[in-house]
Image (cartoon, helix red, strand yellow):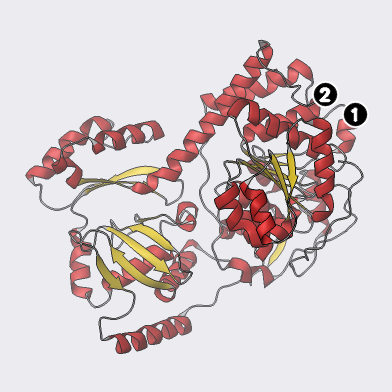
Amino acid sequence: MSRRTKAGSHAPRKEAGKAVRKRKAAAVLERKPALGWRTSDEDEIDLRRWRGSTEILDVVAHDSAYEFFGDFRVRSTSGADYEVEIRSLDGLTNSCGCIDHRVNALGTCKHIEGALAALRRGRARAFRTAAAQGSPRIEIFLDRRGEAAPAIARPTTAETKSLAKAREWLHPWLDENKALAASPQRIEELTAALAKAPAAIRATIRISRHFAPWLERARRRRERLEAAAAFAADVAAGRATLDVLTHPLLPYQREGAMHLAFGERALLADDMGLGKTIQAIAGCELLARRKGVERVLVVCPASLKAEWEEQIARFSARTTRLVFGARAQRLATYRAPAFFTIVNYEQVLSDAPDINEILKPDIVVLDEAQRIKNWPTKTARRVKSLRSPYAFVLTGTPIENRIDELYSIVQYLDPDLLGPLFRFNREFYELDERGRPIEYKNLAGLRERIAPLMLRRRKADVEKGAARPHGQDLLRSYGGRAEASLRGLPPARGAIDRQGAAASAAAGGVRSTPAIARLHAHGLRHPGDPRSELPHQPQARGAGENPRRSSR
């Protein structure tokens, strides 16, 4: 039977409500003001502890056998529930299923801190005793402090017979230093073996359920590299072709199609006029043939829906449906979709949940994706809520004003790649003493970080024939890179933007012409942008339509 631990006091309901309100009010008054974007890891942990004390409504234990060191369901004021694992009452090795914990590299989040606060409330002495004794089980988990890595924590209490047997059973999974084997494959094998182990062993060893996203990320990364290498080999052997449309693609467009299809969630940032639409259609066709995808959702400005329909009809034999009309008509379209379903951004604002539940697209294509560059806006949040295994983001201007616009776009594709917003700010902005951004830094590092995700070609380079290799050279280059990556996968960075960071965007902006020159030098800013400096105050731009393009 589950045990419920209210985030309030244990007094009668009326008194408990007063205590909760009083405690939350005190927490608000006691919170230290932030110095703009200049925060340390300790500041970020304190922020999560403050939010845990003010934004958690309910904590429910799943197993009454474990009073402190168990699994808990935590409900926040947003109404969402999260699964929390507590294995330490005074450390940063607990786990949560939220995206913030997955990627912030701090080892905690507001849900963990809220659960700890609820467990401590009214039982301070028992809490201190349990903290000193530690978890009675062998804990196998993903340590999220810094780079995510599998870890093991052993009980510090006296050895029991069941604990000795569990240690013996676990021995084959440890290296010569008695450390846990760190490869995803070994963790999967250990999890499968423990599920078949005797009940006494399963009761003594707990493997975190929150390994799943880490294992899934590693699996998908390897699969897409293998798919790219296999496709290149099949084309070289005549078993497959790059001519997947009714009209032939130019060599650089072939590479763009492969980048989208085998990048899985990728950004194509070519200059206007280089055919991003055609490359996206070709990428969808490649995935239809190689992976069997059946449903593609295209999200674009309303003024471009007809153009997408025309381009698909010209270059592909796939069916297309444009979404129009009242809600009932739109829902009918989602229930009986064509291969390509085309919606505009305004429709996503109201229809995102229906698209996820009814249409369930295999691929989401975001055209003119600078529409999601302002991450605090409702449009950006709704579009980023769209779920799909594959996502193609198309924009000729990945950065118009500030590099955190690129951060917002990348966040949709791979929230782990650029880290949390507070680390992104530290790494790529010079901040003044008040935590306001005054200059960019480390742009070469930023370009290197996003290189696997973003492909960008300039019109001048393509016209000179200097953009990318041609013909079989392209296949050898692409297939060779995939094979090389398979032989030595670099570690993925962990972390993501914390909720509520929108307020920090008002701290100020970068005003520096040399900064823009460096953006140009690193290929991060649109080369034809006439602006000479960045605005002082970043503001969310309106949702007005872009003019219809005469060429893609």
Counting the numbered discs, the total is: 2
Viewer-nearest residue: 517 or 289: 289
Badge 1 crowding class, 10 Å Cα cut-off, few under 14, some 14 to 19, many 20 or more, is: few
Viewer-nearest residue: 534 or 518: 534
Label whose residue precedes the other's in the sequence (2 or 1): 2
Q: Which residue is mark 2?
A: 248
Instruction: Identify the residue shown where x is 90% and y is 31%.
Output: 463
Viewer-nearest residue: 539 or 350: 350
Residue 171, position in %: x, y?
21, 33
> Which corner quadrant holds the C terminus?
top right
Query: Can the viewer see residue 526?
Result: no
Amino acid type shown at disc 1: Lys
Relative to 162, is 263 above or below?
above
Distance from label 2 to label 1 (Cα)? 20 Å
Residue 449, position in %: x, y?
63, 42
Residue at the top extreme, as displayed: 237
Residue 377, position in %: x, y?
67, 65
Instruction: Identify the residue shown where x is 42% and y is 52%.
Output: 145
Relative to 346, is 16 above or below?
below
Query: Can the viewer see residue 305?
Result: yes
Q: Which residue is mark 1?
A: 464
Answer yes or no: do the residues labelled 2 and 1 have beta carbons within 8 Å? no
Instruction: Identify the residue shown where x is 90% and y is 36%.
Output: 460
> Which corner quadrant holds the N terminus?
bottom left
Badge 2 crowding class, 10 Å Cα cut-off, few under 14, some 14 to 19, many 20 or more, is: few
Q: Is residue 78 left or right of residue 431?
A: left
Numbered tag placed on residue 450 in the rendering: none
Amino acid type shown at disc 2: Pro
Q: Give the SS element for disc 1.
A: loop
